[in-house]
Image: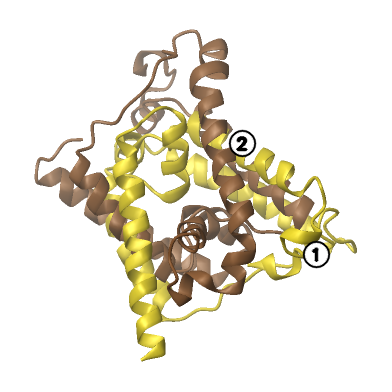
Amino acid sequence: MSDATDGGPDDRHPLFLPVIYAGGLIFGLGLAISGMARPEVVLDFLQFEDFGLLFVMGGAAVVTGIVFAVATRLDSTAPLTGSEYTRRVKEFDRNVVVGGVVFGVGWGISGICPGAAYASVGIGNLPILWAIAGMFLGAYAQGYLRSRRSTA
Amino acid sequence: MTALTPLLAVGDLFPRGMLPYLLGGLLVGAGASVIYLATGIIAGASTFLESSLSYVSDVDRFNRFKYIQSRGWRVVFTAGIVSGAALWAFALGPAVVPTMDPGVWTTDVEWWRLLGGGVLVGVGTRLGKGCTSGHGVCGVGSMSNTSLVNVATFLTFAIGTAQLVQATGVAP
């Protein structure tokens, strides 16, 4: 959500999009290597048959944890945007818990979460398009209902 | 694969070994870190769902400034994720791991579970302000209490649901 400081599409650094792409590429490479792009691997974890996913989430959080901790202590700004290295803490409200419950049930049924679903397309798993279609439907439904409620 | 695992007890917990998981996790963290260090942006994967809907829908929520402004790079980020996974599945993986089949892999999870679960994931991640990457990787990495609560909640309910699914005999 630190997007507000990235200057917007018009005055972006020429390397902005290439670096976003490269970061996404490394991210997707990791999801494919780890097996998270396969719902079966995720379900094996949730059903206590293979605890490997702990290393995926743990390994990733340790890396970002170190990088965030070091960067926020640096007295410098991000080279491509001039943004300060902030620790973005999302506001806590009831939706954080309700959303977590709904997401958890969906993850348990399907074995798929958004990033892993995109990566799954990359490994040629076309049936995953069902899940991506579902995610867009779900995102649309909640956005439609919340927008209607706030204007009513 | 289990036969190759040296310690039986550990092998039971990690029938596919530990290395791919750890390596994959480190790379997921590295990808998020590259973007953060270069741009200051904490990247999550699920916002793409809502910001992309602004291309086709005039619903207020999807057309908020922060979605309109970030929707372009979020498409690029997602394209990066798809290409990175493809790079591993069709080129790097088969080259590095001799036993890996370079062909297309498809899931055996039923389409109705993917679709139904997907709808709940779409609702839940957007209501809960993030998913496994935004809350799970970046939020936990920055020790955000909001993210820790969200992750504990979705993990608990995912485990309960998946065990229930398994108990009803639906495979996998």
Task: Tell me which residue sits at (30%, 53%) in the image.
Answer: A134
On the rendered image, what quadrant is the N terminus of chain B found in?
A: top left
Task: Tell me which residue sits at (50%, 8%) in the image.
Answer: B98
Q: Residue A25 — which label?
A: 2
Left or right of A149: which side holds B164? left
Residues under numbered marks 2 and 1 in contact, where contact means CB atoms less than 8 Å apart: no
- Per the image, label 2 sits on a secondary structure element best described as helix
What is the chain letter for disc 1?
A: A
Work out whether residue A91 or residue B9 is closer to the camera in this orientation and state it: A91
* Residue furthest out toward the left: B168
- Neighbours of disc 1 within 10 Å: few (<14), some (14-19), many (20+): many
Task: Tell me which residue sits at (42%, 35%) in the image.
Answer: A120
Task: Look at the image and tell me whether residue B53 can be seen.
Answer: yes
Name which residue type carries label 2: Leu
Name which residue type carries label 1: Ser
Q: Quadrant of residue A91?
A: bottom right
What is the chain letter for disc 2?
A: A
What's the image's color scheme?
by chain
The mark nearer the N terminus, 2 or 1, is 2
Residue B84: x percent and y percent? 57, 32
Left or right of B45: which side holds A88? right
* Residue furthest out toward the right: A75
On the rendered image, what quadrant is the C terminus of chain B found in?
A: top left
Residue B77: x percent and y percent? 60, 46
- Per the image, label 1 sits on a secondary structure element best described as loop
Q: Mark 1 sits on what residue?
A: A83
Residue B160: x percent and y percent? 24, 56
Count of residue discs: 2
Q: Is residue B90 above or below residue A86?
A: above
Residue B14: x percent and y percent? 39, 30
The colour applied to the residues of chain A in this rendering is: yellow
- The chain displayed brown equals B
